[in-house]
Image (tube, helix red, strand yellow):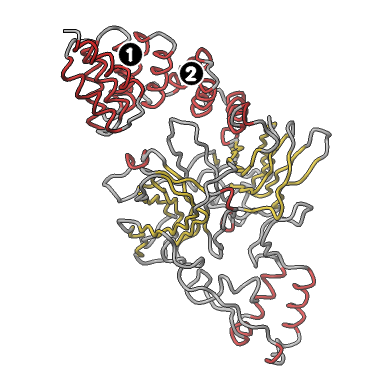
Amino acid sequence: MFRSCATCHRPGEAAPFSLLTYSDVKKHARQIADVTRSRAMPPWLPEPQELKFADELRLTDGEINLIAKWVEQGAAEGNPADLAAAPRFVEGWRLGKPDMILTASKPLTLPPQGSDTYWNFIFPVPLQGTRWVKAVEIRPGDKRYVHHANILVDREEASRKREGEPGAGFGGMEIRIESQVFDPDSHLLFWKPGTIPYVEPESMALRLDEGTDLVLNTHLQPSGKPEVIQPSIGLYFTPHAATKFPMLLQLENDAKLDIPAGQKDFLVTDDITLPVDVDLMAIYPHAHYLGKDIQALATLPDGTKKTLIHIPHWNLNWQAVYRYAEPVRLPKGTTVSLRYTYDNSEENPLNPNHPPARVVGGNRSSDEMCHLWLQVLPVNFDPAQGDPRMALQEALARHNIEKNPGDFEAHYNLAAMLQGKDDLEGAIGEYAAAVRLRPEDAVANNALGAALVAAGHPERGAGYLQTALRSRPDYFDAHYNLGFALAGQNDFEGAAQQFQLALKLQPNDANAEANLGAALAEMGRFAEAKTHLERALQIDPNQALAKDNLEALRKELNSH
């Protein structure tokens, strides 16, 4: 009881009753025997397997039989002197007082009835410079009403645009964080009842920069009366910068989810072949209420198969991140596969539809999902050959496009990988494919426009940058890139206007100041140019363009 039950079954936690004393346990003895026999409790979904998980909650057959026998014999109390010491739980923050505590600025009032609520709270992180985080602890609010929660890192504050009012948060079950640089998700930051915060190895701390938001995605359940939910996040810093950089790989095949009413065994698969050696650190499968049998397999280059996880009786209510007791080496050429089976029949007790109805892939809880996240750490690579995570991202993007040519994100990600390898022609083709799929998307239009300017086509690039600004007038990057496009067409007045608009959005950007100074110098407005070039160097004394132009400008002024 102490080891496998008390973490949740104690005052203040999510379980409905405590199991800390003999009298507590005896009152629920028959129920305990039933739920352990069926393996409904403790909640541990994976089957036993060769690759072990850390902190397994699964009871052995002997332990289950012992509980049943004790109940059958009257649930008698043993000698109190033989009782192990009761576990000592830390009240409040489990890892001690955090170095930084973030609290949602505005609470959410959970409606008393209706379907589950999915809400995203945005936590601005008040940092100066970069800090490294060794642990994150989520306190989601009243745990009785929070089913699960996970954190996404938003390095560009893009999620704020989805809020109706600042600090209020926004709805949505599955969200994607916008990013214009290669900075892949790296850590699984997840909470469910009973979760013990995970302390990362010193070498794998999470980087947080100034101007970063944390987005807490929560699944909330009504109680029958209004409940106020105001979560907090605790950050624990380390002085040690990361030296190892994991990455989250996501397999998914939601496009194949179109499950007829009544079908019991609807199979969906996906797979990817790894282009580099990796250590698999953790795994997180995800489906909704029709998920039945969840499997992930690895087929090694020599044909050997390993079961990464097998959950024969999926239950969304007990989904979790599973960390391996030891890293699992997966060499280059390994194929990772998922096989998810769904049950849309009346025999599925978790089916939300009675009678069963057709269900398709989507973000609502009434839709279905077929997702598998893998936390992998590249190994055995030569840093001189570039970041191995880029090879993983490129392989994943190409796989997703082959599977679904209409995958906007895959086209965009592949374009970014190609641009990172200086393949501008290939990048322009993929950015263009992304824009065809979402013609008004500001990020894709900006990226395509910037790539065209870099390839020597400023007149073509300008049109896409203008489209980006029509969609998002306050888009700093699009103003900045349009300034370059106009300067490339010798429209220095137009370029200066765009750099000025960019500086209104980010007044301390040295590059925008330097380019504004350069555009003004081209128009012969030397005094103004000098002011902006000097301002650029005040912000960044190493700004090369400002240094060169200021020196040339001084020579020009001295010659008259």
Q: Which residue is mark 2?
A: 433
Vertical position of residue 260 compared to residue 229: above or below:
above
Q: Residue at x 43, y 51 (%)?
A: 216
CA–CA distance in space, label 1 to label 2: 21 Å
Q: Residue at x 80, y 33 (%)?
A: 301
Q: Which residue is mark 1?
A: 485
> What amino acid is at disc 1?
Ala
Q: Position of residue 381 (x, y in %)?
A: 68, 33
- Residue sitting nearer the eye, 552 or 53: 552
Q: Residue at x 37, y 22 (%)?
A: 446
Indicate left or right for 320 with 143 as reference.
right
Mark in front: 1 vs 2: 1
Quadrant in which the C terminus appears: top left
Quadrant of residue 297 within the rendered picture: top right
> What amino acid is at disc 2?
Ala
Vertical position of residue 556 compared to residue 7: above or below:
above
Indicate left or right for 512 with 34 as reference.
left
Q: Position of residue 186 (x, y in %)?
A: 55, 43
Indicate left or right for 127 with 406 as reference.
left
Q: Residue 405: which disc? A: none
Vertical position of residue 119 compared to residue 259: above or below:
below
For the residue carrying disc 2, how many other residues have a C-alpha within 10 Å: few (<14), some (14-19), or many (20+)?
many
Q: Position of residue 421 (x, y in %)?
A: 55, 20
Vertical position of residue 332 compared to residue 11: above or below:
above
Quadrant of residue 145 within the rendered picture: bottom left
Q: Secondary structure at mark 2?
A: helix
**Sequence order check, earlier mark of 1 and 2:** 2
